Amino acid sequence: LEPFQIFSFHYGIPAQVVAAIDINTTANQVYRHNFPDTPLWNKTIEGISLDDFNKLSFDMILMSPPCQPFTRDLMVQTLKDCGYTFEEIMVSPTSVGIPNSRLRYYLLAKISPENVGIQTNGLPALPKGRYNNCLHLI
């Protein structure tokens, strides 16, 4: 199995990164120091053109939205406006096999009138196989 080719908006997800993007000067300096062979674009998400994407060969895009207009409140409101039901949980990545113990926020959503219906108290890991049609927002 070959490693995935990814385009990263988020610094810290292990894979073969074909390009990274951020507008934070300090973050870019640190990234360039740590990953000198990875192309680093100093532009906003909105500044990425279709031509930029076509020049890259990647299997997936990974990102962690930084702030406005990508806030949790805006995502939640958009989900509500579009008729999604959702559940918000905090899970340690170690519970799903990622060696990082910092709690992470997850929002599980599906377009359905029924409740997402997972137990959030003491959740050891994300349930397997129950969310095949879910939208996962970070």
Image (tube, rainbow, N blue to C red):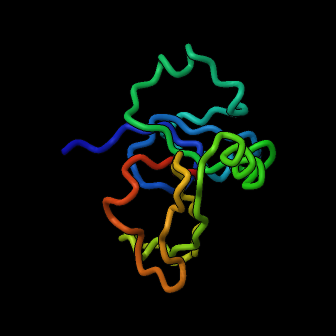
Q: Position of residue 9 (x, y in %)?
A: 59, 43
Name the side, left or right, on which 2 lies relative to 4: left
- Residue at screen point 41% across, 74% down: 125
Q: Position of residue 59 (x, y in %)?
A: 37, 34
Q: Position of residue 83 (x, y in %)?
A: 63, 44
Q: Nearer the viewer, residue 115 or 68?
A: 115
- Residue at screen point 38% across, 70% down: 96
Q: Nearer the viewer, residue 48 or 71?
A: 71
Q: Position of residue 2 (x, y in %)?
A: 23, 42
- Residue at screen point 72% across, 33% down: 44
Quarter of the rendering occupied by the N terminus: top left
The relative height of residue 119 versus residue 85 in the rendered view (above or below) is below
Name the side, left or right, on which 2 lies relative to 129: left
Asked if residue 4 can be seen in this view, the reply is yes
The relative height of residue 48 versus residue 83 in the rendered view (above or below) is above
The single residue placed furthest to the top in the displayed view is 51
Quarter of the rendering occupied by the C terminus: bottom right
The single residue placed furthest to the bottom in the displayed view is 122
- Residue at screen point 38% across, 68% down: 127
The single residue placed furthest to the front in the displayed view is 113
